[in-house]
Amino acid sequence: MVAKLNDVAELAGVSVTTVSRVINNYGSLSKKTIDKVHAAMRELRYQPNAMARSLQGKSSQFIGLIFPNIQNPFFTALTNEIEQLLFEKGYKVIIATSANNIEKEQQYLQMLAANQVEGIITSSHNLDIATYKDTFLPIVSYDRYLSDNIPIVSEDNYRGGYLLGEYLVSKGAKKLLMLSDDDHSNSPTTKRYQGFADAVSEHSHLATQNRNSTTISTKDDIKMIVNYVIAESIDGIFAYNDIMAIQLQNALRDAKIRVPEDVIVVGYDGSPIVQLLHPDLPTIIQPIRQAAQRLIDTLFHEIDNQVSTEFSMLPVTLYVPK
């Protein structure tokens, strides 16, 4: 039997109006009240307007997308591919950007649930969001570990990092700097840094700096890295994404350091716009369209309550300037 709004209100010990306000994130309510309503919804597996939708024989035909930001051309391209493929299936998307703001992401999750999305595709860079573990919505994650019960679509990150390491070694780089965004989670992206380290371990000296990839680095941040590169005679840099790599290329050249003659900078992502505007950047190309299709296929397996399919990792390729 499908739970009703009245059932949630009775279990939570509040009024139907209060439940509606919690669902729609409207008005001022205490955290205790909000938590009681969410607990009742989880226990009853209640979805807003689920009965009305089933009686009409319709779905909302909305999918929620939560990405760290769409300033990064990679996420812009991935969002565009997902939107196009879902549109062809008769679905529309609600896009949210979470950056590194946990409260913002939690509110977006509540908003998406209240707007009756059929499921969520996310690449959250925020850790320890209990809402993901407790949600009853179908969710699929891109390259991020969120919970044991949330499937992950992943690319061969280890292979990507290894290919970049091999490339720098083949170019004779001996003193390397790896800029990572390793959050020490179980997310597949951490494997690219291990792959890189393994590829260069017997050939080069490797220094590592951990940084936040969810925001674009400031001029001061870039200047500090350039100063370190000069002081330590670094001749090869692995940046965690193409944006950081391009920033470093520009800053090094401004400092009269030749790129790639004196310092080789490599990136990661390989979005179409970066390949078009910066063909001199060695990078790993991630298969954006394949990733979008795999994310959608996996999500609809979850929506249809099908047994999860174990997909192989998506392949990546190394791009080097000719």
Image: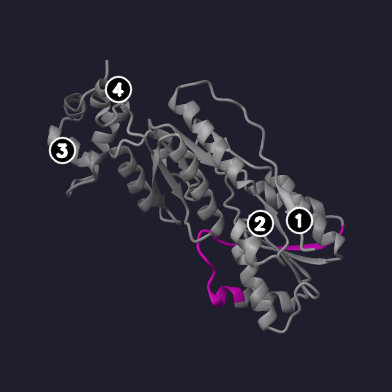
Q: What's the CA distance linking mark 2 and mark 3?
A: 47 Å
Q: Are marks 2 and 1 in contact (CB under 8 Å)?
A: yes
- On screen, residue 5 versus residue 239, left or right, reads left
One can see residue 197 in this view: no
* Helix, strand or loop under label 4: loop
Mark sitting earlier along the chain (3/1): 3
Q: Choose the circle earlier in sequence order: 4 or 1.
A: 4
State the image coordinates of residue 121 (x, y, percent, origin top left).
47, 40
- The image position of residue 219, as x and y in percent, is 55, 77
Q: Which mark is residue 60?
A: none
| Neighbour tally class for label 3: few under 14, some 14-19, many 20 plus, Cα within 10 Å | some
Marks 4/1: CA–CA distance: 51 Å
Labelled disc at residue 18: 3
What span is colored magenta in the figure? Answer: 203-222
Tag 2 and tag 3, C-beta contact below 8 Å = no
Mark whose residue sits in front, 4 or 1:
4
Which of pointers 3 and 4 indicates the residue nearer the eye?
4
